[in-house]
Amino acid sequence: MKITVVGGGSTYTPELVDGFARLRDTLPVTELVLVDPAADRLELVGGLARRIFAKQGHPGRIVTTSDLDAGVEGADAVLLQLRVGGQAARQQDETWPLECGCVGQETTGAGGLAKALRTVPVVLDIAERVRRTNPDAWIIDFTNPVGIVTRALLQAGHRAVGLCNVAIGFQRKFAGMLGVAPHDVHLDHVGLNHLTWETGVRLGGPEGEDVLPRLLAEHGATIAGDLHLPRPLLDRLGVVPSYYLRYYYAHDEVVGELRTRPSRAAEVAAMERELLEMYGDPALEEKPALLAKRGGAYYSEAAVDLAAALLGDRDGGPAGPSAGGGGRGAGGSPYQVVNTYNRGTLPFLPDDAVIEVQAAVGRKGATPLPVAPLDPLYAGLVANVTAYEDLALQAALHGGRERVFRALLAHPLIGQYAYAETLTDQLIAHNREHLAWA
């Protein structure tokens, strides 16, 4: 089995490699190809990757290359984890929106739109090259903004599934609180990428007992603290929102914080420099503890589960009652939280909207599990952001100042025409080198 990682020079990659090494019975990789145009980073990351495989006794071969076409040729699955413009572009995404009093963040608001505009054309070009060399390969997208990027891939007819680590992070956290194995925790996870709520936490599978009320009663203060939201809000909602909901539920508070502290991009850039120096140490044979602070926790386990399910022997239809919603065995988990077409799952959205929900995953792709009717408090925001994502994708595919303006005006974190006008000009000015139409 050949797996290719585009963006293989990322400091994330040792996390992924560690998962491939530990979980080789789930995903028997024979060749792992790391593709990245940054040859210096790729050499450091590739060296550590080989040492991780060697220490854990993995027999697979690790190849590094800057040649995308050669790297994806014959791949069974291609993982996308790239950042167009690097941390420098992220730094811009997180700062210039603050000048209008809007959240500066790399996946939502004006910064998220900027990232989408830079990213979608590059990802579609990569996907076309994958299709030319191996039309049967699956594309697993971890590149943000995952919902918009996955929708672009699916609309272009690619075999693609989007992946985020938010759900698996909640699953692991809740399992620890409940004193059970992670594979015994099934989340009623619903919404859009980076706009989700855990409306139920079930033991043993999708039909299991819902223990979310117990979790909130016994651990609500801890959960609220992790989300930086007040405990009474969680009690009133009766659900656990993704930490990205804080940008909506506490917008002005977040803007105030962002204006008075270093950007996350600056923190990550400093961390990456330290990590790359560590990766260059020939004595290092495992992912360093510092990597946990980089972000992407449990990414490797989610990616292994998803790839194993897509490349395994299931057809992607509804799985049997033994499924645990995150457990692992030969062929990966039968139920996984992914980004895929709505197909009527949320009836108030178009079928071709991309949602993030539990799905049965197999060789034919992802089939969303049924979702209980969504409270209007959440459904209204989901519908609003879905409309924004549709406009954002049109801007990414076709360009033009007016399309950028319309997307910004539609976003619930912006919404005012004066802000949208100013942010449109700022976005184009800061991203001109990445926008073919600008």
Image (tube, rainbow, N blue to C red):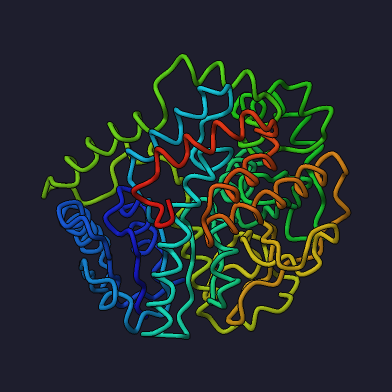
Q: Residue at x 23, y 60 (%)?
A: 37
Q: Residue at the spot x=30%, y=59% of the render? A: 8
Give left or right: position of 125 versus 200.
left
Q: Is residue 253 above or below residue 144?
A: above
Where is residue 169 drawn, in percent x and y? 56, 45
Please state which of residues 199 and 138 is positioned toward the viewer in this rendering.
Answer: 138
Q: Quadrant of residue 265?
A: top left
Asked whether the viewer can see residue 271, the reply is: yes
Seen at 34% across and 84% down, the residue is: 74
Query: Looking at the image, which is closer to me, 338 or 158?
Result: 158
Q: How far across and how far down the image is residue 229, in percent? A: 67, 24
> What residue is shown at x 77% (from left), y 25% (from top)?
233
* Up-down relation of residue 258 to residue 370 (above or below): above
- Name above or below for residue 184 compared with residue 379: below
Position of 209 with respect to 386 (left or right) is right
Does the rendering let one see residue 189?
no
Q: Quadrant of the N terminus?
A: bottom left
For the image, the number of numbered tags is 0
Percent position (x, y) of residue 95? 44, 28
| Front-most of residues 13 and 348 | 348
* Residue 332 image position (x, y, % from top left): 54, 70
